Image (cartoon, grey):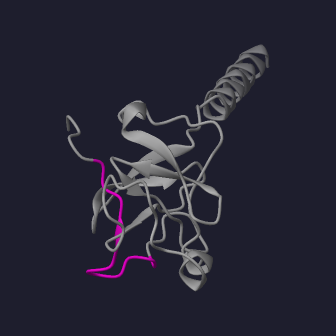
Amino acid sequence: MSIKLFALTLAIVALVTTIIAIGAKETYTVDMVNSEEFGYYLTNETFFTLYRYLSDPQNAEISTCNGDCARLYPPFYVDELTVNPELNSRDFETITREDGRKQLTYKGWPLYLYTGDTKPLETKGYVYGRWFVVQPMNLTR
Protein backbone atom coordinates (compact mmCIF):
# COMPACT_ATOMS: atom_id res chain seq x y z
CA MET A 1 0.00 0.00 0.00
CA SER A 2 2.80 2.45 0.77
CA ILE A 3 4.39 1.87 -2.69
CA LYS A 4 1.10 2.87 -4.35
CA LEU A 5 0.88 5.95 -2.14
CA PHE A 6 4.49 6.84 -2.93
CA ALA A 7 3.87 6.42 -6.69
CA LEU A 8 0.72 8.53 -6.46
CA THR A 9 2.61 11.24 -4.57
CA LEU A 10 5.34 11.28 -7.23
CA ALA A 11 2.72 11.54 -9.97
CA ILE A 12 1.02 14.46 -8.21
CA VAL A 13 4.36 16.24 -7.70
CA ALA A 14 5.21 15.76 -11.41
CA LEU A 15 1.80 17.10 -12.45
CA VAL A 16 2.03 20.16 -10.19
CA THR A 17 5.58 20.87 -11.43
CA THR A 18 4.39 20.67 -15.04
CA ILE A 19 1.45 22.99 -14.35
CA ILE A 20 3.74 25.50 -12.65
CA ALA A 21 6.22 25.35 -15.54
CA ILE A 22 3.48 25.91 -18.11
CA GLY A 23 1.98 28.75 -16.09
CA ALA A 24 5.40 30.33 -15.67
CA LYS A 25 6.04 30.53 -19.43
CA GLU A 26 6.74 34.13 -20.23
CA THR A 27 4.28 35.82 -22.53
CA TYR A 28 5.38 38.42 -25.04
CA THR A 29 3.34 41.32 -26.39
CA VAL A 30 4.89 40.45 -29.77
CA ASP A 31 5.52 36.78 -30.34
CA MET A 32 6.29 34.56 -33.28
CA VAL A 33 4.74 31.38 -34.64
CA ASN A 34 5.53 29.04 -37.50
CA SER A 35 3.01 27.81 -40.06
CA GLU A 36 3.22 25.60 -43.09
CA GLU A 37 1.73 28.30 -45.32
CA PHE A 38 3.72 31.37 -44.19
CA GLY A 39 6.70 30.10 -42.22
CA TYR A 40 7.53 32.31 -39.24
CA TYR A 41 5.28 35.31 -38.65
CA LEU A 42 4.51 37.77 -35.86
CA THR A 43 1.55 37.64 -33.50
CA ASN A 44 0.37 39.54 -30.47
CA GLU A 45 0.51 37.98 -27.00
CA THR A 46 -2.68 35.99 -27.59
CA PHE A 47 -1.39 34.70 -30.94
CA PHE A 48 -3.52 36.87 -33.18
CA THR A 49 -1.70 37.56 -36.44
CA LEU A 50 -0.02 40.89 -37.08
CA TYR A 51 -0.29 42.35 -40.57
CA ARG A 52 1.33 45.04 -42.69
CA TYR A 53 -0.31 47.04 -45.47
CA LEU A 54 1.44 47.36 -48.82
CA SER A 55 0.12 50.93 -49.25
CA ASP A 56 2.01 52.06 -46.14
CA PRO A 57 5.41 53.47 -47.06
CA GLN A 58 8.19 51.80 -45.09
CA ASN A 59 10.08 54.05 -42.65
CA ALA A 60 7.81 57.03 -43.36
CA GLU A 61 6.29 57.01 -39.85
CA ILE A 62 2.77 57.23 -41.26
CA SER A 63 -0.14 54.87 -41.66
CA THR A 64 -2.37 55.06 -44.73
CA CYS A 65 -5.02 52.76 -43.26
CA ASN A 66 -7.56 55.14 -41.72
CA GLY A 67 -11.33 55.39 -41.34
CA ASP A 68 -13.14 52.23 -42.47
CA CYS A 69 -9.79 50.58 -43.21
CA ALA A 70 -8.66 51.09 -39.59
CA ARG A 71 -11.96 49.69 -38.32
CA LEU A 72 -11.32 46.50 -40.30
CA TYR A 73 -7.56 46.45 -39.63
CA PRO A 74 -7.10 48.13 -36.24
CA PRO A 75 -3.66 49.58 -35.57
CA PHE A 76 -1.61 47.45 -33.18
CA TYR A 77 -0.10 49.13 -30.14
CA VAL A 78 0.99 48.10 -26.64
CA ASP A 79 2.32 50.39 -23.92
CA GLU A 80 4.93 47.94 -22.67
CA LEU A 81 6.60 46.06 -25.48
CA THR A 82 8.08 42.65 -24.71
CA VAL A 83 9.28 40.60 -27.65
CA ASN A 84 10.12 36.98 -28.21
CA PRO A 85 13.89 36.64 -27.55
CA GLU A 86 14.42 35.61 -31.17
CA LEU A 87 13.25 39.07 -32.23
CA ASN A 88 15.12 42.34 -31.70
CA SER A 89 13.18 44.95 -29.72
CA ARG A 90 15.13 47.69 -31.54
CA ASP A 91 13.24 46.71 -34.73
CA PHE A 92 10.02 48.06 -33.16
CA GLU A 93 9.14 51.74 -32.95
CA THR A 94 6.06 53.79 -32.18
CA ILE A 95 4.43 56.23 -34.56
CA THR A 96 1.55 58.64 -33.98
CA ARG A 97 -1.28 58.28 -36.48
CA GLU A 98 -3.21 61.18 -37.99
CA ASP A 99 -6.06 60.47 -35.52
CA GLY A 100 -3.61 60.84 -32.61
CA ARG A 101 -3.49 57.14 -31.69
CA LYS A 102 -0.17 55.36 -31.33
CA GLN A 103 0.84 52.41 -33.47
CA LEU A 104 3.79 50.04 -33.38
CA THR A 105 5.97 49.48 -36.42
CA TYR A 106 8.29 46.60 -37.23
CA LYS A 107 11.31 47.51 -39.33
CA GLY A 108 9.44 50.62 -40.41
CA TRP A 109 6.15 48.89 -41.34
CA PRO A 110 3.04 49.87 -39.31
CA LEU A 111 1.45 46.83 -37.62
CA TYR A 112 -2.23 45.91 -37.67
CA LEU A 113 -4.61 43.24 -36.43
CA TYR A 114 -7.61 42.05 -38.47
CA THR A 115 -11.14 41.99 -37.06
CA GLY A 116 -12.01 38.94 -39.19
CA ASP A 117 -9.50 36.82 -37.27
CA THR A 118 -11.69 35.51 -34.48
CA LYS A 119 -9.35 32.80 -33.18
CA PRO A 120 -5.62 32.70 -32.49
CA LEU A 121 -3.39 31.77 -35.45
CA GLU A 122 -5.98 32.70 -38.08
CA THR A 123 -4.66 34.58 -41.11
CA LYS A 124 -7.90 35.68 -42.77
CA GLY A 125 -6.54 39.22 -43.09
CA TYR A 126 -3.94 38.10 -45.59
CA VAL A 127 -4.88 39.51 -49.01
CA TYR A 128 -2.31 38.75 -51.69
CA GLY A 129 -0.70 41.91 -52.99
CA ARG A 130 -2.26 44.18 -50.32
CA TRP A 131 -2.14 42.79 -46.78
CA PHE A 132 0.64 40.53 -45.56
CA VAL A 133 1.41 38.58 -42.41
CA VAL A 134 4.52 40.14 -40.88
CA GLN A 135 7.43 37.79 -41.32
CA PRO A 136 10.53 38.42 -39.20
CA MET A 137 13.55 39.18 -41.29
CA ASN A 138 17.12 38.09 -40.64
CA LEU A 139 16.37 35.30 -38.21
CA THR A 140 19.25 33.00 -37.43
CA ARG A 141 17.15 29.90 -38.14
Residue 5 lies, in percent from the top left, at 78, 20
Q: Is residue 139 visible?
A: yes
Q: Confirm whether residue 116 shows in the render.
A: no
Main SS category, magenta section:
loop
In which quadrant is the C terminus drawn? Answer: top left
**In which quadrant will I find the N terminus?**
top right
Instruction: In the rendered view, tell whether residue 12 sits above or below residue 98.
Output: above
Would residue 54 appear left or right of 81 to someone viewing this image? left
Q: Nearer the viewer, residue 83 or 23?
A: 83
Q: Which residues are magenta?
A: 124-136
Residue 13 percent location from the top left of the image: 71, 21
Query: Is-magenta flag for residue 129?
Result: yes
Say which quarter of the image contains residue 85: top left
Residue 15, quarter of the rendered image: top right
Q: Tell me the residue at 60%/80% (across/down).
A: 67
Magenta-span inclusion, residue 140? no
Residue extending furthest bottom?
A: 68
Looking at the image, which residue is at 46% across and 42% down? 93
Eyeballing the image, is 97 above or below 108? below
- Measured from the top left, where is residue 110 in percent x and y? 43, 58
| Most foreground residue, 30 or 71 | 71
